[in-house]
Structure formats: C-alpha cells, structure tokens
Amino acid sequence: MFLTFDDGPHPEFTPPVLDLLRTHGATATFFLIGERIDRYPELVRRIVADGHALGNHSWSHPRMRDLPLPQQLVEIERTDEALSRYDGNRTHPFRPPCGVLPANLLLHFARIGRTVAFWSYDSHDYQQLPAPTLFAQMRADPPRDGDTVLMHDDTGATVQLLAELLPQWRDEGFELRAMPAGRG
C-alpha cells in the first residue's frame, strides 16, 4: 500500500504524522504546497531525512482549471525548484490540487512524459469529519494491497486515523511505503 499526504507541510500536524510513520516503519510520499515549503523548511528537511519522498502539489494550491497553461506551469516549476533544494531531484511527481487536472495540462504532461500522481483510495480526511466517523467509513470500505491512499497532513483527524490504522495495516500484512519513484 502506498501512503500519500497532501497539503503540507503543516507545523502542528506534520510532526506527529512523521512520528507515527517512524514508529510503524512506514514511508510515504508528501505532496507539498510550495509556499509552505518556504515557510517550514525544517519540516521538509525532516520529511527527507526520515526517508520519505517529495511530490509537487503546486505553489499556492489554486484551481488549476482557472489558470492559463503558462500560469499552471509557473505553479509547478516554482514548486519543483523549491523541492529540489531538499532532495536534489529536478522534477517531482505532480498531484493537482483537488485532483483536477485540466486537459491542457494533461496534454502538456503527455508531450513531455511527466508523471501525474493520482490515488486509488480516498480517506476523505479533508472533509473535516471527526476521526471516529472517518475510521468507521474506512473500516466499511478498506484500502487493498497496492492501493495509493490519499490523506492530508494538515488536520488532527489524520493523526488520529493513523494512530489507529498504521498498526492495524501492519498486522494485516501491508507494506506501507512511498510511491515508486517515477519521472517527475
């Protein structure tokens, strides 16, 4: 199972997420917002030092479909530049904000062979529901081996979910890891 976290880094919630991942021997891919990278560089350094992968979630988390292609590319390129200061990679897998990838950006990525990183399992932790509600939903329809799980490291509910789910997933035999490296 591939673990992914969007919308960070967050000064309150990313550290406990990282602590839980370390405790349970899990790695993840963190799709970071560029302007937060500059605001919380120590968290980005810790993400990389702890063995996690970095992904691009745009500079300011805009509605990409509302931007012309040149502005979309600035959002992505600016974030890649910020991320590369931490992991040395020139480009990173891109996950569009809210999962909305405009056709013009999709065609551009197809032309240049750039990776778009979606998910196959949505935890719905961004809905601001209480952790017990989210946990019940996930138990009723759990992720499967090989799924890419979408979570967010900017909410306390995610921390509570992980505290319950990581040991459960380990007990069920899941290998919890970052997405495979691909072309950014």
Image (cartoon, rainbow, N blue to C red):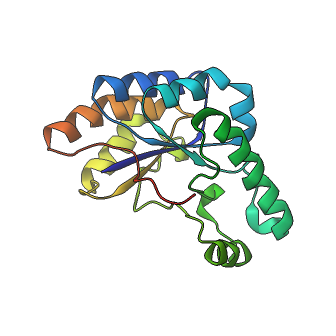
Pick the residue in front: 157 or 93. Answer: 93
Residue at screen point 77% across, 47% down: 78
Residue at screen point 55% across, 64% down: 115
Task: State which quadrant residue 6 falls in.
Answer: top right
Q: Along the horizontal axis of the image, is 183 left or right of 24?
A: right
Pick the residue in front: 123 or 78. Answer: 78
Task: State which quadrant residue 19 falls in.
Answer: top left
Q: Position of residue 156 (x, y in %)?
A: 50, 29
Q: Along the horizontal axis of the image, is 160 left or right of 34?
A: left
Q: Along the horizontal axis of the image, is 90 left or right of 75?
A: left
Count of numbered circles in the view: 0
Q: Position of residue 74 (x, y in %)?
A: 81, 56
Q: Along the horizontal axis of the image, is 180 left or right of 32?
A: left
In the image, residue 46 sits, relative to residue 123, either above or below, namely above
Q: Position of residue 163 (x, y in %)?
A: 32, 28
Q: Position of residue 88 (x, y in %)?
A: 60, 39
In the image, residue 182 sits, relative to residue 102, either above or below, namely above
Residue at screen point 59% across, 62% down: 99
Task: State which quadrant residue 170 falls in.
Answer: top left
In the image, residue 95 sits, relative to residue 78, either above or below, namely below
In the image, residue 55 sits, relative to residue 116, either above or below, namely above
Residue at screen point 35% across, 25% down: 22
On the rendered image, what quadrant is the C terminus found in? bottom right
